[in-house]
Image (cartoon, rainbow, N blue to C red):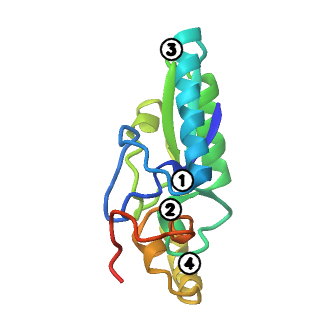
């Protein structure tokens, strides 16, 4: 099991739904290091026969804390279910899953996890009123609001190849 991160694909716009087959677009050096870890996991799976699951974790918490996390939140219990599948499922050679609960606003196609038995038990939308109220108190961040990686994208942003609507 490799604890990867949603920051491997953080530079995708929020309006674009992506699966695990989308090319990596890290939003930071942290995201790039996780992309390297996923590539290394694939090397060891295919060259040396290890069974590896890379889990692109969204945001773990008891409840989603803001608008962005309504899309990427994973309840601890759902995360445990994903980890168990990754460690115990006999058909896994090398898989990538998104660590996300049942999020109506989600940006990720997690069909690989569903194919292997993932059934999230928790729904972010049940906490939307509180998350949106907390989000209203955050400072404006047009770059972070445009990309899935949020503030990881706006940090050190110098006018990349895609422009967020400002």
Residue with the most extreme top position = 48
- Residue 7's mark? 1
* Disc 3: which residue: 46
Residue 41 or 112: which is nearer the viewer? 41
* Disc 2: which residue: 149
Check disc 1: other Cα within 10 Å, few if <14, some if 14-19, many if 20+: many
Quarter of the image with the N terminus in it:
top right
Check disc 4: other Cα within 10 Å, few if <14, some if 14-19, many if 20+: many
Which residue sits at x=47%, y=63%?
71
Q: Secondary structure at mark 4?
A: helix
Which residue sits at x=51%, y=82%?
132
| Apparent side of residue 63 relative to residue 125 in the rendered image (left or right) | right
Residue with the most extreme front position = 158
- Residue 131's mark? 4
Q: Earlier in the sequence, mark 1 or mark 3?
A: 1
Q: Earlier in the sequence, mark 4 or mark 2?
A: 4
Q: Position of residue 100 (x, y in %)?
A: 52, 52
């Amino acid at each position: 099991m490799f604890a990867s991160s949603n920051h491997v694909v953080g530079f995708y716009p929020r309006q674009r739904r992506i699966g695990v087959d989308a090319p990596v677009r890290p939003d930071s050096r942290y995201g790039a290091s996780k992309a390297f870890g996923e590539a290394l996991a694939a090397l060891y799976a295919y060259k040396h026969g290890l069974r590896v699951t890379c889990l692109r974790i969204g945001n773990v918490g008891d409840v989603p804390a803001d608008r962005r996390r309504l899309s990427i939140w994973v309840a601890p219990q759902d995360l445990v279910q994903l980890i168990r599948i990754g460690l115990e499922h006999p058909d896994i050679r090398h898989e990538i899953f998104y660590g996300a609960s049942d999020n109506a606003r989600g940006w990720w196609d997690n069909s690989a996890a569903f194919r292997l038995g993932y059934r999230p038990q928790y729904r972010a939308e049940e906490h939307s009123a509180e998350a949106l109220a907390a989000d209203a108190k955050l400072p404006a961040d047009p770059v972070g609001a445009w990309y899935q990686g949020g503030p990881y994208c706006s940090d050190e942003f110098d006018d990349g190849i895609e422009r967020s609507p400002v």
